[in-house]
Amino acid sequence: MDEFFSNTAYQRLPSEIKKLSRDTQSVCIFLRLRKTEEQIAVETGFPLSKVSKLSSEVKRTLIANGKYDIITDPLMISIDADNSGRMEPLSVEISPEDRLALKTFLTSLEKAISGMENDDRKLLHLFFHQRMTGREILRFYEKTGMNGAEMPKSVGGVFRSVETVLKKLLAKMKNTATIGHNNLSVKALKSVLSETGVAT
């Protein structure tokens, strides 16, 4: 097995990438250095087809775990301009295969969110889309008279409620996501939702 970098470089990789083969880890480091697949093939001596396959594996893993930005400029995902509430990736230079995987993932995420209870969806919308603080959300609930048994009663309660709702969303995503279904975490969902927002 070829070692192209120091042990420290491999140790700094995200834990999800560390679970992959050493060749895949090496390709991830090259991608972090903004090397093209052609440059990686030259530097490693790997066939370009192998580099492309490993590169796709790295990208899918990072996308599924909300860490794609470590190999590219930050991946910004926004709501469509027509206010339809659909989540789409903005134009970034990724392969058609990876773009399709990302689009499929976002469609699964959107479907899971739309299938949630209205109160859960509203909380995610306020927290991730409106970017409200815990205190602002609490005031919003108080002003709108939303004070049912499920509504948070303190700022800490808001954050606990967000975590609870994210866990429910995670369970839905594990049943529907076509990529990364074994690697999804609450932290990854937080990262993705922080970029996409949640339209209601």
Image (cartoon, rainbow, N blue to C red):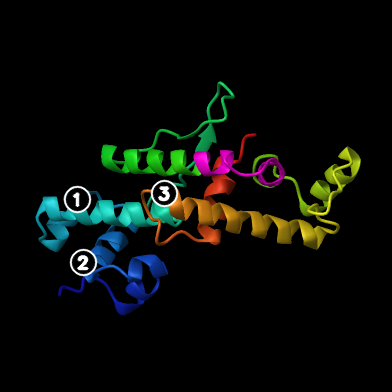
Residue at (16%, 60%) from the top-left corner? 43
> Could you say where residue 7 lies in the image, as x and y percent from the top left?
31, 78
Q: Earlier in the sequence, mark 1 or mark 2?
A: 2
172 lies left or right of 96: right
The residue indicated by pointer 1 is 52
Q: Earlier in the sequence, mark 2 or mark 3?
A: 2
Q: Earlier in the sequence, mark 1 or mark 3?
A: 1
Q: Can residue 66 be seen from the camera position used here? A: no
Say what amino acid the circle numbered 1 marks: Ser
Task: State yes or no: residue 154 in magenta.
Answer: no
Residue at (22%, 57%) from the top-left corner? 54
The residue indicated by pointer 3 is 177
Q: Which quadrant would the N terminus be assigned to in this image?
A: bottom left
Magenta-highlighted stretch: main secondary structure?
helix
> Could you say where residue 23 lies in the image, as x and y percent from the top left?
21, 66
Q: Is residue 6 above or below residue 79?
A: below
Say what amino acid the circle numbered 3 marks: Ala
> Could you tell me how far apart the alpha carbons at marks 1 and 2 are, in whole angstroms?
12 Å
Give the magenta range: 110-126
Residue at (46%, 59%) from the top-left corner? 184
The residue indicated by pointer 2 is 23
Q: Which residue is more in the foreground, 14 or 158?
A: 158
Q: Is residue 161 above or below residue 128?
A: below
- Mark in the foreground, 1 or 3: 3
> Could you say where residue 164 lies in the image, as x and y percent from the top left?
66, 59
